[in-house]
Image (tube, rainbow, N blue to C red):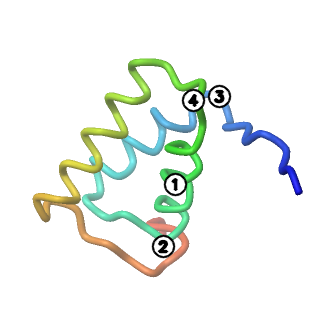
Amino acid sequence: MTFPPLQLIPGAIAELFVQVSTSGVVTLADRYGLMAAVLTEDLSDEERCAIDRLLRSAYRGALQPSDELSAIQ
């Protein structure tokens, strides 16, 4: 069974990076977005760098995971 290729929304990685960096919270939707981005083969170097920075921040404990779908209340 083959699945169609993932199609990220243009600018989604940049928006995710800004939102997570500003709030310090990684929501459930953010984590799914990051997972989809990591599985995408055609990311730009800038997008890969942004994802790497978010993953390093999470590893260092600088980001707070949340089971909420959105950080906006």
For the residues labelled 4 and 1, the Cα–Cα distance comes to: 16 Å
Between 34 and 41, the residue placed more toward the observer is 41
Image vertical order of residue 47 relative to residue 24, above or below: above
Q: Which residue is mark 2?
A: 73
Distance from disc 2 to disc 1, alpha carbons, whole Å, reads 23 Å
The answer to whether mark 4 and mark 1 are in CB contact below 8 A is: no
Give the numbered dot on residue 62: none
Residue drawn at the location 85% of the way across and 44% of the way down: 4
Left or right, 62 with respect to 23, comes to left
Classify the position of the N terminus by image quarter.
bottom right
In terms of depth relative to the viewer, which is nearer, 73 or 56? 56
Give the secondary structure at mark 3: loop
- The Cα–Cα distance between marks 2 and 3, rounded to whole angstroms, is 25 Å
Q: Give the crowd class for mark 1: few <14, some 14-19, many >=20 residues within 10 Å.
A: few
Image quarter for residue 41?
top right
Q: Nearer the N terminus, badge 2 or badge 4?
A: 4
User: Number of labelled discs?
Assistant: 4
Discs 2, 1 touching: Cβ within 8 Å: no
Which amino acid is tagged 1? Met
Q: Which residue is mark 1?
A: 35
Count neighbours of disc 4 (C-alpha within 10 A) and say few if under 14, some if 14 to 19, many if 20 or more.
Answer: few
Q: Residue 47: x percent and y percent?
A: 43, 27
Mark 4 element type: loop
x then y, percent, for residue 21: 28, 47
User: What mark, if any, has residue 10 been given in the picture?
Assistant: 3
Q: Earlier in the sequence, mark 2 or mark 3?
A: 3
Residue that carries the numbered disc 4 in the rendered image: 11
x and y, in percent, of residue 38 in the image: 50, 44
